[in-house]
Image: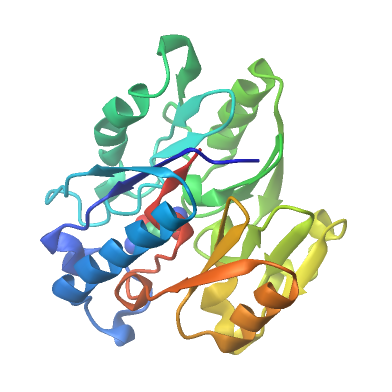
């Protein structure tokens, strides 16, 4: 795998009204979130990718989490049908950006009653693990696999019990290495990988991203940072504290392809 392009979207001021399962963390500080977004873009550029920065969308408080309304594979793009009502319209906003990179034949859609969030999709080469979650339903997964098959790719379903999205708790770092936390430590689906186990008190940092040999790690999780470095990776740390308040992490903030 090598990524050439990344799409991000600037956070909107309305992000303070974004969906969260952790209101006790407080509302995000918008100015700080913007600065963290700048740092995120700078880290991506250091990994050698071209970054397309889309403008903020005030009508969608969670729209900076561009990973959810689209999934981009090496064969084509899938515009999803996001499972949260307040986010569903984000699919129409991401589509024109995706079409800058793919022609008509290579852009497919998940249609209602199927729902799917890109945060539930983890790419491991030509295999795609898809979490069945509160956002991603059986019909969404069925459509997703049908599209993959048409492109010579394949997928398998992973039932989720505790986390919002699949990639909240498990992320692939290429070279057979996988970061696993919580319910994913023992799932048979991932037994075949070299699993790097994340301690419970650093569970948020299971959401790291591999970009062309470098792993971007959230700032402030020393055990995970060291484990990733020990696995042989160069690392960059980016603070995502304001996105964490909305259940968002490093992967959620970009589409990488
Ligand atoms: C949401 O609940 O949809 C947002 N507040 C967070 C989305 C995080 N996205 C992701 O894990 N891919």
Percent across and percent down for residue 96 are 27, 26
Q: How many marks?
A: 0
Note whether residue 161 is visible: no
Seen from the viewer's position, the closer of residues 113 and 254 is 254
Percent across and percent down for residue 211 are 55, 53
Seen from the viewer's position, the closer of residues 220 and 146 is 220
Residue visible at 69% across and 21% down in the picture: 149
Outermost right residue: 192
* Left or right of residue 98: residue 234: right
Q: Quadrant of ligand 1?
A: bottom left
Colour logic: rainbow
Tell me the quarter of the picture where residue 227 sits: bottom right
* Left or right of residue 151: residue 64: left
Outermost top residue: 105
Seen from the viewer's position, the closer of residues 69 and 85 is 69
Tell me the quarter of the picture where residue 55 sits: top left
Residue visible at 16% across and 71% down in the picture: 30
The quadrant of the picture occupied by the N terminus is top right
Percent across and percent down for residue 217 are 52, 71
Judge whether 113 appears above or below 66 on screen: above
Note whether residue 53 is visible: yes
* Left or right of residue 255: residue 149: right
Judge whether 66 appears above or below 202 on screen: above
Percent across and percent down for residue 65 are 35, 53
């Amino acid at each position: 795998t090598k990524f050439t392009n990344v799409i991000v979207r600037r956070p909107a001021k309305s992000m303070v009204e974004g969906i969260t399962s952790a209101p006790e963390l407080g509302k995000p500080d918008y100015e700080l979130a913007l600065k963290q977004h700048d740092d995120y873009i700078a880290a991506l550029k250091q990994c050698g990718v071209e970054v397309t920065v889309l403008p903020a969308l005030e009508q969608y408080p969670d729209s900076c989490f561009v990973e959810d309304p689209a999934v981009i594979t090496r064969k084509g793009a899938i515009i999803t049908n996001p499972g949260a009502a307040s986010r569903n319209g984000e699919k129409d906003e991401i589509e024109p950006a995706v079409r800058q990179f793919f022609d008509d034949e290579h852009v497919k859609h998940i249609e209602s009653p199927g729902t799917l969030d890109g945060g539930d999709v983890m790419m491991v080469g030509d295999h795609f693990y898809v979490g069945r979650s509160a956002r991603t339903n059986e019909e969404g997964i069925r459509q997703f696999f049908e599209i993959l098959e048409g492109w010579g790719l394949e997928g398998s379903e992973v039932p989720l019990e505790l986390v919002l999205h699949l990639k909240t708790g498990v992320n692939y770092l290429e070279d057979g290495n996988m970061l696993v936390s919580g319910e994913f430590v023992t799932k048979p689906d991932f037994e075949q990988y070299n699993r790097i186990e994340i301690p419970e008190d650093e569970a948020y940092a299971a959401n790291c991203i591999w970009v062309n040999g470098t792993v971007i790690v959230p700032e402030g999780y020393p055990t995970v940072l060291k484990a990733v470095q020990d696995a042989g990776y160069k690392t960059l740390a980016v603070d995502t504290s304001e996105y964490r308040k909305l259940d968002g992490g490093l992967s959620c903030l970009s589409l990488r392809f």
